Structure formats: C-alpha cells, structure tokens
Image (spheres, rainbow, N blue to C red):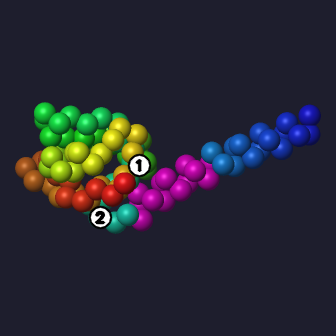
Amino acid sequence: MKNRSIVLVAVLAVFLLGSVTAIWACKSAGPNKHVGSVMAIDAKAKTFTIRDAETDHLMTFEATDKILKELKVKDRVMVGYKEENGKMIAVDVQA
C-alpha cells in the first residue's frame, strides 16, 4: 500500500511539473511567439494549427510551403509570427 502511494505521488509530480513547464515556455517565449503541439496541417489552405501550451486553445497560422513541409502532426513547436489583416502568419517555426 505504501509503495502504491509513492508511485501515485511520483506520477502526479511528473504531471504537474510537465504542465508548469509548458505554461512557463509560452510566457517566456516572448512577444509574437506561441509554443504548442501541431494538431493539423492543411497544405491546400497553407495553414497549420497548434494547441497552445499556455491556453490550451487551438491557433491557426498561415505558412509558406517550406514551413509546412517541415512540420508533422504532434510536433512540439515554437512559432514566431506576425499579424496582417487579422491573420497570424508564421515567420519562424522551431521544432
């Protein structure tokens, strides 16, 4: 029973530390940057969508063909972007 409690505490600690790290990563990334996991890539529309690590919201970015070819669904990325006409345009994506 005691071993089971220790394992439970260890699992919870890892989960909580992982969550804190993800949130910290977004805030420290700087202005016009978001950190998250790639959820979808639409080559035809020239967009990709991430689940933001800080807010857990989906965010869609327009991107060049070159950027899109380098991405895979489930990649953890930091996206540098600019805003034009109400759209977010990826200018730098680091996996």
- Check disc 2 and give the amino acid type: Pro
On the image, the x and y values in percent for residue 26 come to: 41, 57
Which residue is denoted by mark 2 in the rendering? 31
Nearer to the camera, 69 or 12: 69
Q: List x then y, in percent, for residue 89.
A: 17, 52
For the image, the number of numbered tags is 2
Residue lying at the far left in this picture: please name it.
Answer: 85
- For the N terminus, give its image quadrant: top right
Residue drawn at the location 30% of the way across and 45% of the way down: 71
Instruction: State the CA–CA distance, disc 2 to disc 1.
Output: 18 Å
Residue 61, can we see it? no
Residue 48 visible here: yes
Determine which quarter of the picture holds residue 82: bottom left
**Residue at 28%, 56% in the rendered image:** 93
Mark 1 — residue? 76
Structural crowding at the residue carrying mark 2, measured as other residues with C-alpha within 10 Å and reported as few (<14), some (14–19) or many (≥20): few
Residue 87 is situated, as x and y percent measured from the top left of the image, at 14, 47
